[in-house]
Image: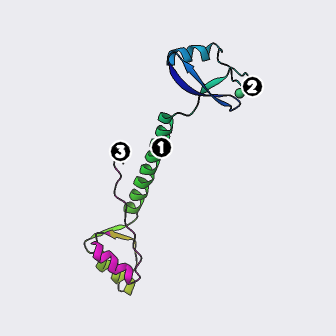
Amino acid sequence: MIHYRLVCEAGHDFESWFKNSQAFETQAHKGQINCPYCESTKVTRGVMAPHVARTQDDQGKKLRELVTELRNKLIEGTDDVGDQFPEEARKMDDGEVKPRPIRGRATFEEAKALLEEGIQILPIPDAPSEGN
Ligand SMILES: [Zn+2]
């Protein structure tokens, strides 16, 4: 016997026992399952844990896609100055060179120093990997 949480077309939810999942499918198909509240036979399985998990996966996937897209845009729209990043950022802040969008590497200490000097920098997110 398996226990199903069911929901009718009117959104009533109720619970019922079936011999197995096939028995549920067959009975639901033949209209043999009635909602105890409104007697509707249009009954489907309610939201179960695996479905919720799937939804979370989809959300995770969407987030990964967003991060990847953002990362690509950041990379496309900026000049890679590599290790010169802290120096370049400072030069632009001082007006020594014309400001332009740059990206590069900075150590945690360098990044902290730049922020303390009031230079606006943002970390580029790492490319997300599946299963995060
Ligand atoms: Zn109902």
For badge 1, the amino acid type reads Gln
Residue pushed farthest left?
Answer: 83
| Cα distance between the residues tagged 2 and 3 | 43 Å
Pointer 1 local density, CA inside 10 Å: few below 14, some 14–19, many at least 20: few
Tag 3 secondary structure: loop
**Upstream in sequence: badge 1 or badge 3:** 1
- Locate residue 44, reporting x and y percent: 61, 25
Cβ of disc 2 within 8 Å of ligand 1?
A: yes
| Cα distance between the residues tagged 1 and 3 | 12 Å
**Upstream in sequence: badge 2 or badge 3:** 2
Which contiguous range is marked in magenta? 104-132
Location of residue 116 (image quadrant): bottom left
Pointer 3 local density, CA inside 10 Å: few below 14, some 14–19, many at least 20: few
**Tag nearer the camera, 2 or 1:** 2
Cβ of disc 1 within 8 Å of ligand 1?
A: no
For badge 3, the amino acid type reads Gly
Residue tagged 3: 131
**Upstream in sequence: badge 2 or badge 1:** 2
Q: Is residue 98 above or below residue 75?
A: below
**Tag nearer the camera, 2 or 3:** 2
Tag 1 secondary structure: helix
Which residue occupies 34% across, 82% down? Answer: 90
Residue tagged 2: 38
Location of residue 28 (image quadrant): top right
For badge 2, the amino acid type reads Cys
Queried whether the magenta region covers residue 48, the answer comes back as: no
Whether the residues at callouts 2 and 1 have beta carbons within 8 Å, the answer is no
- Locate residue 3, reporting x and y percent: 53, 24
Residue tagged 1: 56
Which residue occupies 28% across, 69% down? Answer: 105
Pointer 2 local density, CA inside 10 Å: few below 14, some 14–19, many at least 20: few
Which residue occupies 29% across, 77% down? Answer: 110
